[in-house]
Amino acid sequence: IETKFPTMGTTIFTVMSALAAEKGAVNLGQGFPDFECDPRLVDAVTEAMRKGLNQYPPMTGIAPLREAIAAKVEAIYGRKYDPVSEITVTAGATQAIITAVLAIVKPGDEVIVLEPCYDSYVPNIELAGGKVVRVPLVPGTFRPDFPKIAAALSPRTRAIMINSPHNPSGTVWTRAEMLQLQELLAPTDVFVISDEVYEHMVFDGQLHQSAARFPGLAARSLIVSSFGKTYHVTGWKVGYVAAPAALSAEFRKVHQFNVFTVNTPMQYGLASYMASPEPYLQLPAFYQRKRDLFREGLARTRFRLLPSEGTYFQCVDISQVSDLKEAEFCKWLTSEIGVAAIPLSAFYGGGFDQRVVRFCYAKKDETLRSALDRLAKL
Ligand code: PMP
Ligand code: GLN
């Protein structure tokens, strides 16, 4: 058939997970936990199903979940979102992001992405008919490059997509950086799609600087998060968008014809589980310990470790280990060493090669140790 998207390939996550399975490799590629979620969360969902909460929920999500989300956002970030008009439950962050893009980007509009970026952003903009404007994060440190962002802004800029804590680099934007973005956008009408799916995974006492904390940003932002990351249930695909009422209304116009609603029992289960903040308050310590365990092991290899300030990703420079390009190196590592990783080139357009690959450490300690045993020879 005549294809509409001749250049659109298969996502790197599908490719590397399939290769890892085929080769029996330890899969530190695709980002997902290999341990169970809290059984109380499963009980809460099961109870909802047994109670017969199995039919369509409201289009925007069930009220108790929207209320729990609004309460959490206000408690942590100090901004009050109206659960009726400003919070929408989505089928994970992936749907939230594409729906946000489709809702605000008109054909020909420019959208700024900061590369490397999550692999769905660019195809999402293209599907909306928008023009992708790529601005690199500072090579090596992956911090926002404000002079370059400023230079990329034009009268046609409709939106900028940001992501902190950042996949793949694990950097976390500082308050000063968020303030700089706020100041830069102040004279513009540019919207912000702020992908904050790793909001609860920030380490070493740093704070997550949600766009919700900054009135000038919050007023123009669609903030996206995902329960998959926070509660170790990536397969459930439930997330949300918080945005001012006028932006939420635009979002919902598309959402209603995109998924219409998100599964009911999961929403009830999540709403009751959210009554306790403990699970997400404990998350930084939980992942920081795994990060440290993994980094200690990697420090004994010739990989050069980059910082991992947040997320559950650890990037390493491979220059001292191999001359292969990132993508080839990841295939070699999976096939010959038995550990799967993701090449950073998957998060860039156009042939970048920073000699960096990404490991996911959201794994049981035994999985991390088994991967480290295999990597020890490098
Ligand atoms: N954004 C980023 C930065 C991610 O890492 C992920 C996880 N794959 C998503 C969005 C998508 O999240 P979800 O699984 O909830 O669709
Ligand atoms: N967010 C995860 C990652 O970056 C999984 C993505 C996916 O499977 N699409 O690895």
Image: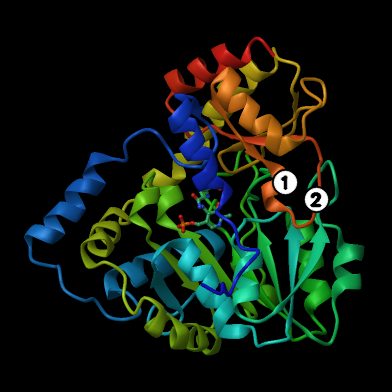
Q: Give how far apart the Cα atoms at labels 1 and 2 are.
A: 7 Å
Of residues 245 and 139, the one nearer the viewer is 139
Q: Which mark is residue 351?
A: 2
Q: Is residue 176 left or right of residue 117?
A: right
| Closest to the observer, 285 or 262 | 262
Categorize mark 2 by other alpha carbons within 10 Å: few (<14), some (14-19), many (20+). few
Asked if residue 346 can be seen in this view, the reply is: yes
Residue 236 location (% of width, % of height): 33, 54
Residue at 55% in and 39% down = 312
187 relative to 346 in the view: left or right: right
Residue topped by disc 1: 345
> Camera-side residue: 320 or 170?
320
- Tell me which corner region of the image, top left, top right, bottom left or bottom right, holds residue 349: bottom right
* Whether label 1 touches label 2, CB < 8 Å: yes
Q: Secondary structure at mark 1?
A: helix
Tell whether circle 1 marks a residue whose Cβ is less than 8 angstroms from ligand 2: no
Three-letter code, disc 2? Gly
Q: Residue at x 53, y 66 (%)?
A: 224
Instruction: Tell me which residue sits at (80%, 50%) in the image.
Output: 351
Compared with 245, 143 (above or below) is above
Q: Position of residue 94 (x, y in %)?
A: 49, 63
In the image shown, does 303 or 20 lie closer to the viewer? 20
**Dot 1 or dot 2, earlier in sequence:** 1
Return the x and y of residue 216 as percentages of the image width and height: 70, 77
Position of the C terminus, as image quadrant, is top right
Residue type at numbered disc 1? Ser
Seen in the picture, residue 299 relative to 263 is either above or below; the reply is above
